[in-house]
Image (cartoon, helix red, strand yellow):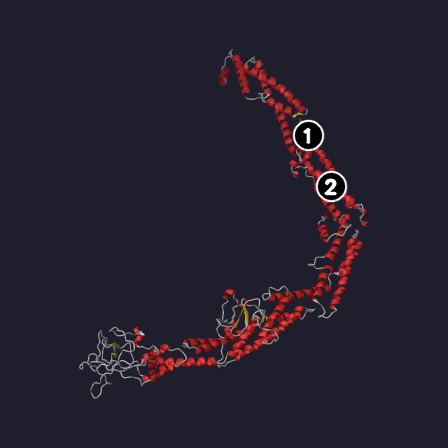
Amino acid sequence: MREDQHNAVDELEYIFCEGLSLKIQVEELPLVEIELKKANCREKALKACDSKMSLEFIQQLLKEATILQIEGEKQFLKLSSVLAVAFPWEDSAREILSHKAPISDFEDMIRASENIFAILPSLEKVKDALSEANSWLMNTKPYLVSSTCASNSSRKVEDLQMLVSQSKLLKLSLEESRMIEVVLKNCKAWEYKACSLLDDAQSLFELDNIVHGISSGLMSKVEDLIVGIQSTITSGIVLGFDFNEITKLQASCSTLQWCRRALSFCNHSPSLEDVLEVAEGLSHSHVSSALLKVLVDGVEWLRRALEGIYGPHNSRKCKLTDVEDILTDYKTINMTFAAVNYQLEEAIRKHKLWQEQVHKVFGLSPRERSWSSLLELKEHGDTTAFSCSELDLILSEVEKVENWKKNCMDSIGTLVYNENSLLDALQKIEQTLDRSLFIHGTLQGQKAKNLCICCFTDSKDQGFLTCCTCMDCYHWRCIGLTTRDIGFENYKCPYCEILMGESRCENGDGLLRFEKKHVELKVFTELLSEAEHFCLWIDERDVLNQVVEKALACKCYLRAIVNLALANVEEDISTVSEKLTIAIKACEVAGVCDKQDNSDLELALAKNLWKIRAKRLLNDVRKPTIQQVQKHLKQGLALEISPEDHYMLKLTNVNHVSLQWAELAKKVANDSGELALHKVFELVEEGENLLVDVDEELRILRARCMLYCICRKPFDPIRMIACVHCSEWYHFDCMKLPSTRDVYICPACNPCPEVLPTNHERLSSGKFEEPKTPSPRHTNPRKKRSYKMYERGNEDRDNSNYGYSSGIEFVRWQNRKPFRRATKKRVELRSLSPFLCTQQQQQQQLP
């Protein structure tokens, strides 16, 4: 319909424009103009019905419709009904805006405007007024809730005052406006009360008459003011606002509480801890006030007085003059501390009395001054004396002695760690030195029977063993044995094992199975030297002096034994061994040692053990080898054994003779028979009489005594061949053989004159002599050998080839063959060496 209306308007405008363009007057033109106005009016009415228009527009449109006589049409009637509702609404809106109405009226007006299809001039004002009211209510909400539901930091009195001012500008009537005014009134009342209390506190701090002394009623005023301020602070917190006065009230209350505590010191004697706490707890914001200045001065005097009386023991005490100055300063303060003043006077009196006691003790001789009296003076000085030269002297001397005792215990603690006091520890060490001196044989009157040589205690209640050599007693535990180990019929102690050279140790270090710790003599002498500077005499010094004297005596005896052992070069070492064993026992039981003496003792023991082993090496049934002799000589050189020592000379001589004989034996063994046989026998006899084992060289020499071939020379493993029949060996050169053969038969087993080999040494008058072929068969028949020639690498043959079990075998001819048919029987060599006969007789006696 709207589109048809629009087309009609366009058509009428076109017709009207065409009529105006004609040059003639048309009667219907006014009618067209009227219809065109009506069409435009209807089109505006349709627009007003589709979208909201202002009331003035609608009112003007209805006036045009009335003029055009079309007001009765439907759209104009609808617009008339809108105006009929809108004008009363506007009147009501202006009414509620002109005076403060409840918020519900504004809300009703806004809801009513929703049914009016027109632009209402007062609608925006109504909405703005309602929006301002809602925003104000939102801002006011935190101030209307309980203080427990709101944060103090978000509620400020300034903001509350601004909200009250804003509520007066609102166009609505709100109950919250009256409520917020009540809250603001309460805040103002609280602020007034807080400021009044702050003024009272400040007035109290600035009292003019306080300079003449603290009045008796001041404490009650301070307490009343503290109660009022605390109550006000609580009510301010309940209001839930961020009052600046709360911080000031808290500071004033804290200062007043400090004043109350400071004033309370006037009624009793406080502790130093309480005074220090009060002195450190004052805020310095009001120190300039008169009251606080008096109280601060009084507390400061209290602090100085109590520190002078009860100062910490680990800090530097004040001097007597300082305490006397404190007592003088008491007259200048405006507070009364009678109890503390009396304590200060009493402390000065006790200090002077203590000084008199110190002078009395130090007026005695050092022998008359006791350690207990010095400790008593120190104890009393720690509690009663002020800083003075007498206290420094006492503390210095006590510290010196205590450090000395601590050093002593640290030095000997590893030896006597079970002892509780230094005196007991030193006495225990002295007992060990007594045992050491007894072992040296210097202390008489001590019964050694049934006393363990290690711990020197009675053995009746403990199992013990007795050495079968020295007859000394030893507890099982002292030598590291238990009941399961006991089964010794001939027990030999570790000391006697050293005496007999049976110890497994190579030197004197750690010769015993049980370990003991010793303290160096140098440590005791240094401690004794330090004790010479003490101002008093202590029992530990006497015992330490005895320890040093006895340790020096033990050192003297030990040095004599060590010097004797190191200087001995004779064959007899039994006496030296016994004395060294005594020295070891004495050193082991003693609790004091000297490093140099121990080192020398270990050297003496090592040299003595070397001599014992050298003696055993030379006198043993089983001869030593040259290598063993040389090794022992090398050890002797390492120990710096004297070249004049009996055993060093003897071993050197044995080594020299043995090496010469071995060198000669080596040459003879390789001389291809140049040395006469009886000379070789003599060399063998000389080797068997040596003090060293040269069995290998003797075996080679005995082999050298066996003669082979027709030339009667020793065996040559390189250029010899054996007969397959008689197993006799022949030289290639003697038998004129250019090279080896697989099968060789000697001339004795296959006599052929035309092929018989010749030897210029065997020729006589141009005729052949019968070859004197030695038999290869000896005590044990020789095994069949390969037909090939023996090479140098296959020299090892069975010992049965030679039959040398205990010397050179008796050589004789056996199974001699006739010339050309049998070998020649060997002649007896009985006359060549008596040694051979002796060897044969020994073999015949063997089973």
Counting residues from the start of the chain, the first of labels 1 and 2 encountered is 1
Q: Position of residue 275 (x, y in %)?
A: 73, 52
Question: Does residue 33 sit above or below 214 in this rendering?
Answer: above
User: Mark 1 — residue?
Assistant: 177
Q: Are marks 1 and 2 in contact (CB under 8 Å)?
A: no
| Callout 2 secondary element | helix
User: Mark 2 — residue?
Assistant: 229
| The C terminus, quarter of image | bottom left
Q: Position of residue 697 (x, y in %)?
A: 36, 78
When asked about the image quadrant of residue 152, the answer is top right
* Residue type, label 2: Ile
Cα distance, mark 1 to mark 2?
A: 31 Å
Nearest the eye: 328 or 474: 474
Nearest the eye: 568 or 534: 568
Q: Is residue 374 left or right of residue 765?
A: right
| Callout 1 secondary element | helix
